[in-house]
Amino acid sequence: MLKKIAALGLLLALTVNAGFADSVTEYDLKAAYLLNFAGYVEWPGSPKPVTICVYGDNPFKAATISTLLAAKTGQIDAAFKYPLHPAQLTDCNIVYLAQSEQDRFDKAIALLRNAPVLIITDIQDGLPEGAMINLITESNRLRFEINISTVLAAKLKISSKLLKLAKIVP
């Protein structure tokens, strides 16, 4: 999985203009993680396309998202959306709660509690209660931690391939 993500990062660098290639950011990599997670999670009813929602201030570049979706054509059927209201989160399969929403995580997570929605954050102080995956930076590397009990409560199945790469949080 990490090799695939690194290859996708390289693909980003090679497929967009040279100015962008020199500046692949942390959020470009996080966008690749969000899309790749879609390929390692099973939802009840197998949604097509998988809807990835970014809630709060959008840190992702439109060009990055377009490049990633094009690179995954035929592998992962996904679409990115940007809901403005918490009630719209129930229409998502994956929700990325932006750091701008940190003060309102509880409200969004309460709305999604036990719903088949993969909740992803990137809080460096630890996995927030109710979130399922947290993207963290350790030793200048992007890693992730998973709360497996929260995932199971939402009736989601995560591939053992993904679980092997994660730090499991009780």
Image (cartoon, rainbow, N blue to C red):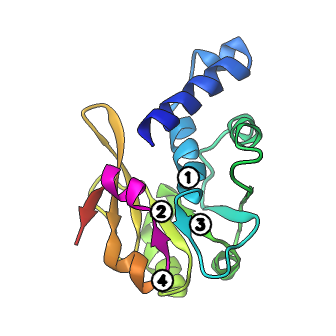
Q: SS at mark 3?
A: strand
For marks 1 and 3, give the CA distance: 8 Å
Residues at discs 1 and 3 in contact (Cβ within 8 Å): yes
Residue depicted at 66% across the width and 20% down the height? 20
- Say which amino acid is labelled 4: Ala
Q: Position of residue 129 (x, y in %)?
A: 33, 75
- Say which amino acid is labelled 2: Ile
Q: SS at mark 4?
A: loop
For marks 4 and 3, give the CA distance: 12 Å
User: Does residue 26 appear anywhere in the picture?
Assistant: no
Residue depicted at 35% across the width and 59% down the height? 163
Residue depicted at 59% across the width and 58% down the height? 38
- Looking at the image, residue 14 sits to the left or right of residue 40; the answer is right
Q: Earlier in the sequence, mark 4 or mark 2?
A: 2
Q: SS at mark 1?
A: helix
Q: Which residue is mark 3?
A: 94
For marks 4 and 2, give the CA distance: 13 Å
Q: Which residue is mark 2?
A: 120
Q: SS at mark 2?
A: strand
State the extent of the magenta-drawn residues as a range.
Answer: 156-165
Can you say whether 87 is above or below 5 in the image? Answer: below
**Residue closest to the eye, 128 or 141:** 141
User: Does residue 145 appear anywhere in the picture?
Assistant: yes
Residues at discs 1 and 2 in contact (Cβ within 8 Å): yes
For marks 1 and 2, give the CA distance: 8 Å
Q: Which residue is mark 1?
A: 34
> Magenta: predominant secondary structure element?
helix
For marks 1 and 4, give the CA distance: 18 Å
Residue 104 part of the magenta segment: no
Q: Position of residue 137 (x, y in %)?
A: 32, 41
Q: Which mark is residue 154?
A: 4
